[in-house]
Amino acid sequence: MTLQELNKLSATNAFEVFFKCCGSTTWAKQLTGKRPFTSKEELIRVSDSIWQSCSKQDGLEAFTHHPKIGDIKSLEKKFASTKEWAGGEQAGVNTATQNTLIALAEGNEAYLHKFGYIFIVCATGKTAEEMLALLNARINNDAATELQLAMNEQNKITHLRLEKLISRK
């Protein structure tokens, strides 16, 4: 989709495509209302500004729209609308050893138990081993620090998805 096509979408359709980029209702509604955008850079800048004003609850809502790292089965079921994006973003787990996958699964469960939400990381370009190392390091954070890190990672994912959404023709 081009930026011009995005700007011409109905508010309902624009909300839907933005919500696929970031599963926060507040963020998607506010970004929808900021159209039209004159450039991809403006879109990213406005997106960042809105995300920075979002609450903890907005972040937690967005996190629920991601599968656990390496959980391919949930990509196929719950996350069908973003399966292609999330699958590509998590491509690093495709070559992981069984031991690494087990450690990721166990780490994800421990993280969820500690923080109450899944481990969020911008997985693009990272191997399963790198993601596991990040999970192991971040699980030691306090709740406030970790929430900020997770929200920053969500914003990186959103950037990538907005970039994928907008193509120049």
Image (spheres, grey):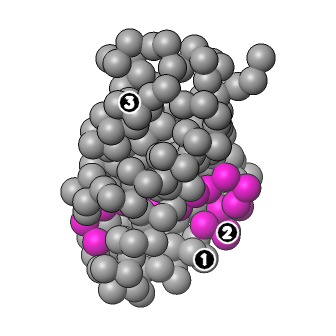
Disc 3 packing (10 Å; few <14; some 14–19; many ≥20):
many
The residues tagged by marks 3 and 2 sit, at their Cα atoms, a distance apart of 37 Å
Q: Which of the marked residues, 1 or 3, is nearer the chain's N terminus?
A: 3
Q: Is residue 98 above or below residue 85?
A: below
Residue extent of the magenta highlight? 115-131
- Identify the residue at image location x=67%, y=69%: 129
Q: How many marks?
A: 3
Which residue is disc 1 drawn over? 133
Which residue is disc 3 drawn over? 32
- Identify the residue at image location x=33%, y=38%: 30
In-front residue for pair 157/87: 157
User: Type of residue at label 1?
Assistant: Ala
Marks 3 & 2, CB-CB < 8 Å contact: no
Q: Is residue 149 visible?
A: yes
Quarter of the figure with the C terminus? top right
Prevailing secondary structure of the magenta residues: loop
Query: Please, what secondary structure does the residue beneath circle 3 have?
Result: helix
Q: Which of the marked residues, 3 or 2, is nearer the chain's N terminus?
A: 3
